[in-house]
Amino acid sequence: MAEHPNESLPHAAGSWGELKGIYRFFDNARVVHDRILLSHRKATVDRIKGKSIVLVAQDTTTLSFTTHRATEGLGPVGSDYTLGFFYHPSLAMDISGVPLGLLTARFWAREGEEPREKESQRWVDTIREVRGIVPQDTRVVVIGDRESDIFAVFAEAHKSGADVLVRATHNRQLAGEWPDLAAAIEAAPLLGGLDITVPRGHESPERQATLALQAQQVLLQPPAAQRKQYPDPIPLSVVCAYELHPPEGEKPVGWILLTTLPAATAEEAALALRWYTYRWRIERFNYTLKSGCQVEKLQLETRRRLENAIAAYSIVAWRLLYLTYVARENPDAPCSLVFSEAEWKGLYLAIYKKRMLNGMQMPSEPPKLSTAVLWLARLGGFLARKSDGEPGVKVLWRGFQRLELATAFWVVAHPSSELGKG
């Protein structure tokens, strides 16, 4: 599947016998998505070990299988009679935003218009599970969008010892000096400014933005209906950031964030805001899973089989995302960090085959990571012109398809080579 990230299962299998094996595996009663991800989760924790802080973004995406309506276990995922189910992963990142791997993953389907309160528990449960998985000597900052602006999220963070960073959507009641969040923001001092990179959207290119920063310390009042369960106000920081001079025709960038992190200074508020921008990484993960690995085209007849397949493809999607960002943050590291010997030598051969036929020698040492990722992107059609910027996930998954052949060719010629990192 990793070798053919955007191909159908029959194509990835290569033969009817292999395809039957894949189907039997996903249908096996002892195979569940959580166990498929278990070894990946352990590897993710190994990558986290030794880090003082880890950021964990959680998000929900809908998986639509309306064109396969006979699939068992589907439910409504929208108001337009779309059928499918929901996927809620959590993605660990280092403080520079490099994705380290998945920590949790949950699936569910609606039997009807299920109460929103019941589904919202996923945001709380993820915080608890992540804090239990990550080594206790590592500080955990769980990041969520507007949907996770739930009082129970802040209460769970306070209880479990995790930190949270959430985009606010409610004008919440406060205890103390200000009656509500709007009043606290209005009174918040201007701390300074911050330049950020706004990632490209569906119809807009990547751009730079200068934001003004305000911050205030507040006491979040528990909702009246929940004060028996949560009797005490929770201390939080509110960070407000808004774009001063957006380009003509562009919607100004702006956020109001609630967090357990300190934000008393411009540096602290800027750090919280910068970490929140890394939440986009999990949106890129979902994009890679659906548009790159094309999991919504799977035809496996039951939701349980689909969940197992999506868990496997999630590891593929993470690796593509990891390559994209680790090369940007660590361009001078040796490519053996993420590529096996057979992979980087196969890449070299694919890029410089004509020169090698004319006597050019294979390098004795692994090239830089940025160089190897650029080779992979070139296999996927990246032109590497000055105006093209950094290669993205899309060209890398195309490159992976050709990497398989290049790696296999090298291994046939050099049987002692390590086949792949997996």
Image: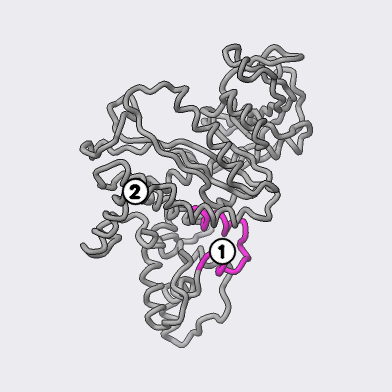
Kindly indicate the quadrant of the structure image that contains residue 213: top right
Amino acid under label 2? Answer: Gln
Q: Residue 230 location, x and y as percent?
A: 64, 20
Q: Is residue 338 visible?
A: yes
Determine the residue positioned at 36% across, 71% down. Answer: 405
> What is the basis of the colouring in this image?
one colour
Amino acid under label 1? Answer: Ser
Q: Is residue 167 left or right of residue 216?
A: left
**Secondary element at image label 1:** helix
The segment highlighted magenta reads 321-339
Distance of mark 2 from mark 1, alpha carbons? 27 Å
- Residue 370's label in the rendered image is 1
Judged from this view, the residue extending furthest toward the front is 30
Kindly indicate the quadrant of the structure image that contains residue 270: top right
Judged from this view, the residue extending furthest toward the right is 265
Q: Is residue 325 magenta?
A: yes
Residues at circles 2 and 1 in contact by the CB criterion of under 8 Å: no
Q: Nearer the viewer, residue 396 or 61?
A: 61
Q: Residue 199 location, x and y as percent?
A: 54, 42
Q: Is residue 211 left or right of residue 296?
A: right
Determine the residue positioned at 69% across, 15% down. Answer: 183
Q: Is residue 402 magenta?
A: no
Q: Which residue is mark 2?
A: 294
**Secondary element at image label 2:** loop
Picture layout, residue 17 above or below residue 301: below
